[in-house]
Amino acid sequence: MLAANTPIIFEQNTPITSSVCKITHQEAHFHENAIELILVLKGTVHMRASHRHVTLQKGDTFSMDPEDIHCIYSDVDNLILTIHQNIINRRYPQKRMYNCFFAYETQNANVHQQAALYEGTDLMLAAALEQAKPQAMRSCAILAELSDKLLEILVKHFDWLSFMWDPTDSNPMLQERFYRIIDYCQSNYKEKISISMLAEKEHFNKNYFSTLMKKTSFEGFSYMLNFFRCDGAEHLLLTTDKSIVEISGICGFSDPKYFYKHFNKWWRMRPAKLRQWYEEYSRAENRVETLVPQEAAAATKEYLSAYHIKRCLAR
């Protein structure tokens, strides 16, 4: 197994947790029960997460959805603030959190997301400072409230629909329809699904629905459905020893050549090449140093001070 599920342990009544780490080589893993957000406090790191392979600099943020296989590595001194959000929370249904597609990414934020990006970063830093307090002084109520606010920002401004329209001018009924379609496709991607069937199911005009889908970050309905299939295939590639042809059939592709085509579109490499990359990556020793609370608080405060000075000067 090249990537393992590592569930996050949350304290009772606290749906959020944080840590500050120095990362040289982090084992590939995923969290079935949590959304992960990272903020680079210092240095430069490289990250592979699902279909994305990016380099992050100081001040950059990045998000991973539940079950996104990911790893971080670097050859320079760095500090990474990591926030985990429990998908079981008091604000949103577990299914909505599990089937989310968040992109809380500094590098890809659009004009409508800039203010929310700053607000989300403020909340991440506040949660880190609260979490770093001695347990007797730590407030579960404050952490729960910070978690609520951060989740609200993610849902309102950084889910995949936010790249389609300005959330201040959104249509709640249309959004709910799209969420139901996503839920259905993620649950049934191994089966044959047509845009006509979904349009009828949700009382859409087929052509109108098709046009809307082309405006999303998925670029169209068939691309979205095949992304779900490739995402499921990645898990099988990295958590089983099944053959690529077998995985192709399990994930709903009628012919392996379609699997190769769509996997290459999103992951920018063939399935065998991705498996080989993780096989080679897994040979290195895991090297992650987690700072003790006092050190984490000091690092967070140092970053926070410089961060707010920079924002003030930019106004």
Image (tube, rainbow, N blue to C red):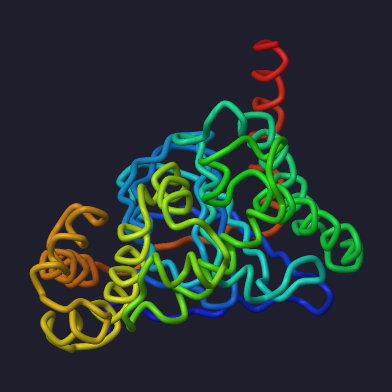
- Left or right: 224 in relation to 67: left
In which quadrant of the rendered image does the N terminus lie? Answer: bottom left
Question: Picture coordinates of residue 119 (x, y %)?
Answer: 72, 37
Question: Picture coordinates of residue 188 (x, y %)?
Answer: 42, 81
Does 41 sit above or below residue 278?
Answer: above
In which quadrant of the rendered image does the C terminus lie? Answer: top right
- Left or right: 130 in relation to 18: right
Q: Closer to the camera, 165 or 85?
A: 165
Question: Picture coordinates of residue 9 (x, y %)?
Answer: 65, 79
Give the image quarter of residue 263: bottom left
The residue under the point 70% across, 58% down is 293
Q: How many marks?
A: 0
The residue under the point 62% across, 58% down is 83
Does 120 sit above or below residue 196?
Answer: above
Q: Is residue 275 visible?
A: yes
Does 92 sit above or below residue 311?
Answer: below
The residue under the point 31% across, 60% down is 222
Does 208 sit above or below residue 308?
Answer: below
